[in-house]
Amino acid sequence: MAEHRPAESARIDLVVFSSLFPSAARPGAGLFIRERMFRVAEQRPLVVVSPQPWFPGQSLIRLLRPSYRPQAAALEIQHGIRVYHPRFLSVPGLLRQFDGWSMALASFWLMRRLKRQGARLIDAHFAYPDGEAAIRLGRWLDLPVTITLRGTEVPHSRQPALRARLSRTLEAAARVFSVSDSLRRLALELGVAAEKTEVVGNGVDTARFHPVDRASARARFQLPENAKVLISVGGLVERKGMQRVIDCLPALIEHHPDLHYLIVGGASPEGDNRAELTAQVARLGLAGSVHFLGAMPSDELKWPLSASDVFVLATRNEGWANVFLEAMACGLPVVTTDVGGNAEVVCRAELGSIVPFGDAAALQRALHAALDKNWDRAAIIEYARGNQWDRRVAQLLQAFDSITGAAASQPGLVGK
């Protein structure tokens, strides 16, 4: 059945602005943004503007690298919501520093039309370059802007030139949301007034993520019924740390000879190190123990999660990893690194353990202990249920309404 196509003139309240958003060309990009904002769309009419990078000749690069910057259609309808993909000039290398300007210029006429349809607020995700572009659009069109920090701001803040731009961008926002308190503290360090900051963590859909029959789940992936099983879910990139887990496996297998490791994920906008991971597995003689399951739709993830004993993500940087709550909703304890908001999610010993990033021995010990421990999985599931989306959406709606009400009573003050 064809999806309902809303009228271009349909009235809207909110524009979600992010270059990282799922599309037919990149179905796995920015799923965490869509999860959040499409729930908001059930309460407030919105559209999505997701600018896509482009430069002349990039189609030639795709002849050698088919996954390079796949192009989405100019307009998609997702669950009845319009998702626009204006193209902006983005040349690799040093010229990427102009992406914020280019993104704003490429989106201006579309945003102007959306304002005429009633848009009262721009809700941007990631401070740079998306937030920077949104602030310019807000000034040009006299619209308030909110920005959600999701983790990329941490490495960006370590670069002096970008740090200054982050500060200017965030100080100009009407509200700075962050998915973790650690990111809120970063916003304060960058000069944002405390009263303009607010933590709105990600949530979990427990109707989608819940345990299924363990024997059936293991049979689906041809896993022995009594094996010990680790699992990671995420893009196959260095930051997520699957290679750090693989390095621990030979020592773990000495204690758990029936150990298996499931890796769910594929290429992402950050890259694809599947070849390096496969070579690492072969070098360590782990071909029978490590299983690459590829990327999976969200509705399917409960199966490999339910087939597993422990979730692990030895990540270098995170804002708030939604997948932790998804794993917990399926009854899994989580072992992860002490970066970003990880310790805010895995906040109690009965939920898992946190290890210092880069400490391979600590990671190995934590995994060994987690595999041996008899976890209270019902308590873990109950914790996940306490973090469902309803509360997060209610918090966002309250903030949006307060901002649009204040903007309506003080026209001309946007971006001042």
Image: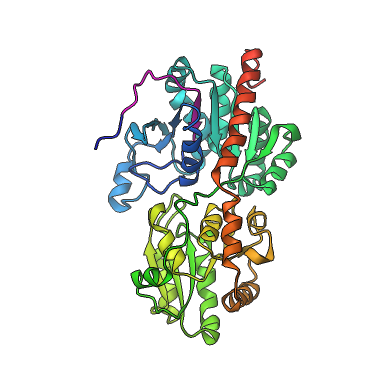
Along the horizontal axis of the image, is 82 left or right of 104? Answer: left
Along the horizontal axis of the image, is 52 left or right of 410? Answer: left
Which residue is painted at 42% across and 82% down in the image? Answer: 285
Quadrant of the rendered structure where residue 295 is?
bottom left
The x, y position of residue 162, in whole percent, is 62, 40
User: Over which residues does the magenta segment extend?
Assistant: 5-18
Q: Is residue 353 visible?
A: no
Decide whether residue 17 is among the magenta residues. yes
Q: How is the image coloured?
A: rainbow
Residue 293 or 346: which is nearer the viewer? 346
Can you say whether 221 is above or below 236 in the image? below
Can you say whether 332 is above or below 344 in the image? below
Can you say whether 311 is above or below 48 in the image? below
Residue 183 or 375: which is nearer the viewer? 375
The x, y position of residue 266, in whole percent, is 40, 58
The x, y position of residue 62, in whole percent, is 31, 48
Give the total of numbered labels: 0
Residue 266 or 218: which is nearer the viewer? 218
* The N terminus: image quadrant: top left
The chief SS type of the magenta part is loop
Decide whether residue 289 is among the magenta residues. no
Which residue is painted at 53% across and 35% down in the image? Answer: 130
Which residue is painted at 57% across and 20% down in the image? Answer: 143
* The C terminus: image quadrant: top right
Q: Is residue 380 visible?
A: yes
Which residue is painted at 55% across and 86% down in the image? Answer: 255
Quadrant of the rendered structure where residue 276 is?
bottom left
Along the horizontal axis of the image, is 322 left or right of 190? Answer: left
Residue 306 or 273: which is nearer the viewer? 306
